[in-house]
Image (cartoon, grey):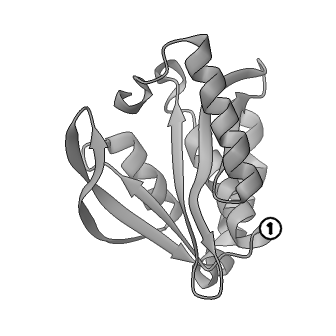
Amino acid sequence: MPWEAWSKTLADTRGYIRGTVRSRRAGTSFDFAVVEAATREVVGCAGLNFVMKDRVHSRASIGYWIRSDRTGRGYATEATVLLLVFAFGSLGLERVEIRVAPRNARSLRIPEKLGVRYEGTARASERVRGRFLDHRVYALTAGDFRRLWPRWKRWLSHGASSRG
């Protein structure tokens, strides 16, 4: 993945972890390891980022990545649902976005499969390898979450154990 190029050494990884701990303490970002149940191996990362909760704002953005040899097994979808439970339940947010590069077909399927509403394209939204990329923006409100949660809950209870 293009954005992981900054992490090439153990020191880089330690710096990343220190940053995630600081962000969690500040309440602005919550990153989690995605662990394969059968092997207990870390297969990716998922997080709730850009968390804003004050008198005016109540929102965050979800990001995820899964190792290329573990994609297509539902890990990112399951992590996304669990992050939405955390965002709307524990944090009491009103809105969560999922932003996806238009050419990332696998990542695009996640919000679409979950029934998250496509709102439009944010142009020049993220710099990757010196170039700004557009993002397709999907968003969910607390009301959408309450409506979709029963379906996701059934999916989690039936599918999670079959993914490893």
Q: Is mark 1 on a helix, strand or loop?
A: helix
In the rendered image, the vertical position of residue 58 relative to residue 2, given as above or below: below
Q: Is residue 11 visible?
A: yes
Q: Is residue 159 visible?
A: no
The picture quadrant where one finds residue 136 is bottom left
Q: Which residue lies furthest to the bottom in this view?
A: 55
In the rendered image, the vertical position of residue 33 relative to residue 40, given as above or below: below
The picture quadrant where one finds residue 83 is bottom right
Residue 139: percent from the left, percent from the top? 46, 71
Residue 28: percent from the left, percent from the top? 64, 59
The picture quadrant where one finds residue 152 is bottom right
The residue shown at (64%, 53%) is: 29
Q: Is residue 73 left or right of residue 93?
A: left
In the rendered image, the vertical position of residue 51 relative to residue 11, given as above or below: below
Q: Name the residue under label 1.
A: 90
Residue 4: percent from the left, percent from the top? 44, 27
The residue shown at (72%, 57%) is: 26
Quadrant where the N terminus sits is top left
Quadrant where the C terminus sits is top right
Density class for disc 1 (Cα within 10 Å; few <14, some 14-19, many ≥20) is few
Residue 91: percent from the left, percent from the top? 75, 69
Amino acid carrying label 1: it is Ser
